[in-house]
Image (cartoon, helix red, strand yellow):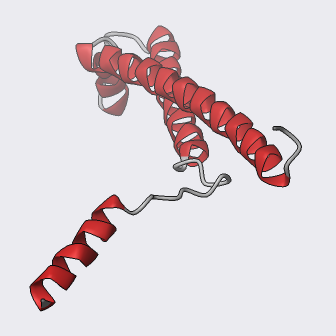
């Protein structure tokens, strides 16, 4: 009897409807801002490296030579690739954020009875 009661409660918990708040959009707004910020930082870093390589000669020594060699390496190209990918992911998250905002408005209208 007790076992049947436990099984029935477990079954009810498994079937229980999950309710997500209309305003909670799975944090896509925050993820959008973070990935766009990361993308902008990476693209700016790449731009600064490439612009600085125009003003630094091959014959430079010390820190300037290290900047010149790094800006002409494949690692600098990976910075721009990650920056573009991060910007694209940020745009996708922005799209999701806008869609969740529209769905929240529709859900609010349905709850208030404005839409049949």
Specify whether residue 3 is in view.
yes
* For residue 93, above or below residue 70: below
Q: Nearer the viewer, residue 73 or 16?
A: 16
What residue is drawn where x is 65% and y is 31%?
Answer: 99
Left or right side of 103 for 92: left
In front of the other: 45 or 63:
45
Q: Quadrant of residue 37?
A: top right
Left or right of residue 96: residue 111 = right
Q: Which quarter of the figure is the N terminus placed in?
A: bottom left
Q: Residue at x 49, y 8 (%)?
A: 54
Q: List the single residue furthest toward the right.
A: 114
- What residue is shown at x 32% (from left), y 69% (from top)? 13
**Whole-percent x and y of residue 115?**
84, 38
- Vertically, is 49 above or below 20? above
The image shows residue 115, relative to residue 42, as above or below, that is below
In the picture as drawn, the residue positioned furthest to the front comes out as 1
In-front residue for pair 26/65: 26
Q: Indicate the quadrant containing the C terminus: top left, top right, bottom left or bottom right.
A: top right
In the shown orientation, is residue 90 left or right of residue 9? Answer: right
Residue nearest the observer in this picture, 22 or 31: 22
- Tell me which corner region of the image, top left, top right, bottom left or bottom right, holds residue 66: top left
Residue sitting farthest toward the bottom: 2
Question: Picture coordinates of residue 67 (x, y %)?
Answer: 35, 25
Q: Residue at x 34, y 33 (%)?
A: 63
């Amino acid at each position: 009897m007790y076992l049947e009661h436990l099984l029935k409660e477990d079954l009810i918990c498994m079937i229980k409807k999950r309710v997500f708040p209309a305003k909670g959009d799975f944090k896509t707004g925050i993820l959008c801002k973070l990935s766009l910020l990361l993308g902008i930082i990476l693209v700016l870093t790449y731009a600064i490296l490439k612009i600085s390589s125009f003003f630094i000669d091959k014959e430079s020594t010390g820190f300037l030579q290290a900047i010149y060699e790094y800006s002409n390496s494949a690692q600098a190209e990976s910075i721009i690739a990650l920056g573009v990918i991060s910007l694209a992911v940020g745009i996708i998250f922005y799209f999701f954020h806008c869609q969740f905002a529209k769905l929240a408005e529709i859900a609010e209208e349905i709850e208030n009875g404005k839409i049949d």
